[in-house]
Amino acid sequence: MAISQSDDQRAKFRSRRKYETDMSTNYITGKKEGELEGKKNVARNMKTRGFSIDDIKEMTGLSSDQIDKL
């Protein structure tokens, strides 16, 4: 895509690209944080119901340290 020779047009283009990149990054980060919180909630419930740490690790993919902190 050819960018206009105008400084104003180039600045707008860069600004729009930065915004799109930032939004994508925020979406990905938020999704990962949400998945981790979901795993922690499941692990917390499993821990309350007496599941072993090994079973919780296997089912959620969390580490022993992460589970102990719940």
Image (tube, rainbow, N blue to C red):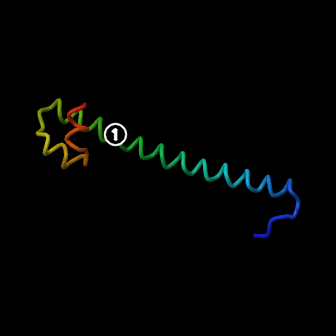
Q: In this rendering, would 8 be left or right of 18?
A: right
Q: Outermost residue toward the bottom?
A: 1
Q: Outermost residue toward the front?
A: 7
The residue under the point 25% across, 48% down is 61
Say which amino acid is labelled 1.
Gly
User: Which of the 4 image quadrants contains residue 65?
Assistant: top left
In the rendered picture of this protein, how many numbered marks are placed on residues? 1
Coordinates of residue 3 in the picture (x, y in percent): 80, 65
Coordinates of residue 58 in the picture (x, y in percent): 18, 49
Q: Outermost residue toward the right?
A: 6
Coordinates of residue 59 in the picture (x, y in percent): 21, 48
Q: In this rendering, would 14 be left or right of 20?
A: right
Q: Which residue is mark 1?
A: 38
Quadrant of the image containing the C terminus: top left
The residue under the point 15% across, 32% down is 49
The residue under the point 11% across, 33% down is 50
| Badge 1: residue crowd in 10 Å (few <14, some 14–19, many ≥20) | few
Coordinates of residue 44 in the picture (x, y in percent): 24, 33
The residue under the point 11% across, 39% down is 52
Quadrant of the image containing the N terminus: bottom right
Q: In this rendering, would 21 be left or right of 42?
A: right
Label 1 sits on a secondary structure element that is helix
